[in-house]
Structures are given as C-alpha cells and as structure tokens.
Image (spheres, rainbow, N blue to C red):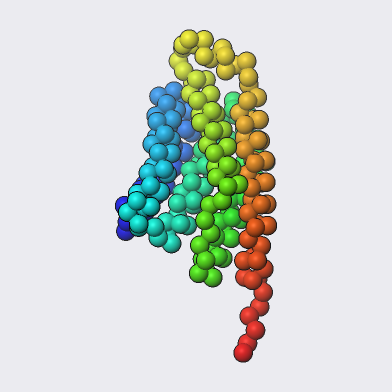
Amino acid sequence: MTVANRITLARLALSIAIFFLIIQKTFYLDFLALIVLIVATISDYVDGKIAKSTNTTTKFGAIADPFADKVLVMACFLAFASIKSLNIPLWAIFLIIIRELTVSTLRVLAALQNYVLKAEAAGKFKTLIQFISIYLILMILTVKSMPQNYFGLKTAVAKAPHLPYYLTAFAALVTVISGVIYIYTHYKILKSSWGEKKQG
C-alpha cells in the first residue's frame, strides 16, 4: 500500500475520533476535536501531494480519498446534529448524505467500467464550503462549551444563535447543486450502466 493511501485510511480513523469527541459535549474534547480536524484537513492535502510527487496515484486512492472526505464531513454534521443547542437542521444533513451517497455510487459504477471519475470544480467548491461550515460550527460549539466567558466570546456567539443552522443549510444547498452538476456531466455513465447488455 502506498504512503498516500495509508494517510487516506488514517483520515478515516480521524473522522471516527472527531465524531466521538464532539458528542461528548465538553470544552476540552471539543477543542481537541478542532485540533484533530485540522490534522485531518492537512492530511487531505498531504496525501494528494505525495501521490503526485512520487507518481504513486492509484485507482484505490482516486476512490478512497473523496470517500474519506465524505465520511469526515458526515461524521462532523451528524455529531453536530446530536447537540440540540446548535439547532442543526436534519433535513440539510439528509440532503448532504443523499448527495454524497449518490456521487459515491456513480464513482463505483464508473469504476466497474474501468473509468475513474476525478474531482471537478463544482465538487471542490462544495467541499470547501462544507469544511468552512464545519470549522465555524465547531468553533462556535467550542466557545459555547467554554467554562468561562473568555474575551466575551460566549456573549458574541450568543448574539448569533441561528448561525449553525444557516451554515448547514447553505452547505446543503451548495452540496445538492454540485451533485446535480456532477450527475448531469456524467449522465452517460449512468445511462450505460442501467441498460441491458445485448447478447451477441
């Protein structure tokens, strides 16, 4: 297994760790989750750089890397949804999950046809918006769980109680739009996969 693929698998493990850290609902573990999230985000950049610089890109990596990103995103949003004070909209998370599962299925269908789907501009923008939302929500959660009102941060966060809701909703909107674009772009793969093969 290549170094890049090992890093990708490590990011999957970090995703699980982040989920369980967040749902503990304590300041120190929320702060630790933020640090682990930073490490996971950096690992996404590092594994891609290593794969390209060492010319060790693989079909496994092409599928596993975006899959690891999706697991990380869903782990964070599902953990946020378990915290009532954040008021995270479940419908938005549902749409995000449906989109990610749909695109992942499309990647598998493409792989069965010996075709590897690479990340596109819409997908990269979607991922950027998702992670910006996740970082902001996790920072809000960390501030809310602080034992004291350091530098008036808790007061500032209290003035925007619906921000996590709108961040998640916006991320869901961008995610769905990118999914529609992705499916439209690769519609031929879908069409060829559900058609019956003619017997010669």
Quadrant assignment for the C terminus? bottom right
Quadrant assignment for the N terminus? bottom left
* Whether residue 119 is situated above or below residue 199 in the rendered picture: above
Q: Position of residue 116 (x, y in %)?
A: 50, 62
Q: Is residue 158 visible?
A: yes
Q: Position of residue 174 (x, y in %)?
A: 65, 41
* Whether residue 17 is situated above or below residue 167 in the rendered picture: below
Q: Is residue 9 visible?
A: no
- Number of numbered tags placed on the structure image: 0
Q: Position of residue 142 (x, y in %)?
A: 48, 23
Residue sitting nearer the eye, 200 or 79: 200
Q: Quadrant of residue 14?
A: top left
* Whether residue 197 is situated above or below residue 182 in the rendered picture: below
**Residue at (58, 37) in percent of width and height:** 129
**Residue at (53, 63) in percent of width and height:** 108
* Whether residue 180 is situated above or below residue 84 in the rendered picture: below
- In this picture, residue 88 sits left or right of residue 67: right
**Residue at (61, 55) in percent of width and height:** 102
**Residue at (48, 33) in percent of width and height:** 23
